[in-house]
Amino acid sequence: MKWTNGNYVILGKKVMLFELWKFKAGSSERGNCLDLIAESLTLIKEPLFNVSQKSIRDRLRLLQYIEEILPLIIIGKEYGF
């Protein structure tokens, strides 16, 4: 599956709706929440989602990494690094 901006927006809305941040990482409650998010995303017809608990977790980690690294890249380019 190729992730588009629309997919990311809908994923973000679902994470906000299910309040994923309230559950400790690695807990069974967080796993249940990720399962519920995956089920609700799979029901959406447009844009199409084919996700699992692991794919959602991986995608959220990727977004967190990009959020942390992107400002450093931009600052580095400004100073010629």
Image: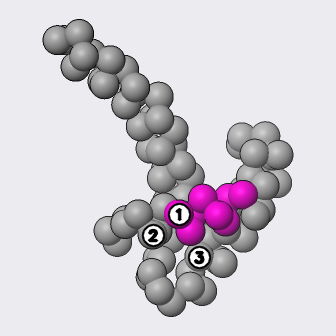
Dot 3: within a 10 Å radius of its alpha carbon, few (fewer than 14), some, or many (20 or more) residues?
many
The reply to whether the magenta stretch includes residue 54 is: no
Mark 2 / mark 3, whichever is N-terminal: 2
Q: Nearer the viewer, mark 2 or mark 3?
A: 2
Above or below: residue 4 compared with residue 28: below
Between residues 10 and 60, which one lies in front from this camera angle? 10
Residue at the image point whose x is 45% and y is 81% from the top: 47
Q: Which residues are magenta?
A: 9-16
How many C-alpha atoms fall within 10 Å of the one at disc 2: few (<14), some, or many (≥20)?
Answer: few
Q: Earlier in the sequence, mark 1 or mark 3?
A: 1
Residue 9 image label = 1
- Residue 14 lies in magenta, yes or no? yes
- Label 1 with label 2: CB-CB less than 8 Å: yes
**Residue depicted at x 36% and y 20%:** 72
Give the CA separation, mark 1 to mark 2: 5 Å
CA distance separating discs 2 and 3:
12 Å
Name the secondary structure under disc 2. Answer: helix
Coordinates of residue 46 in the picture (x, y in percent) = 47, 86
Residue drawn at x 78%, y 55% as measured from the top left = 19
Q: Kindly check if marks 1 and 3 are in contact, taking CB atoms under 8 A apart as contact.
A: no
Which mark, by number, is residue 6? 2
Amino acid of disc 2: Gly
Badge 1 density bin: few <14, some 14–19, many ≥20, Cα 10 Å: few
* Residue 3 quadrant: bottom left
The Cα atoms of the two marked residues, 1 and 3, are separated by 12 Å
User: Where, by quadrant of the figure, is residue 14 drawn?
Assistant: bottom right
The amino acid marked with disc number 3 is Leu
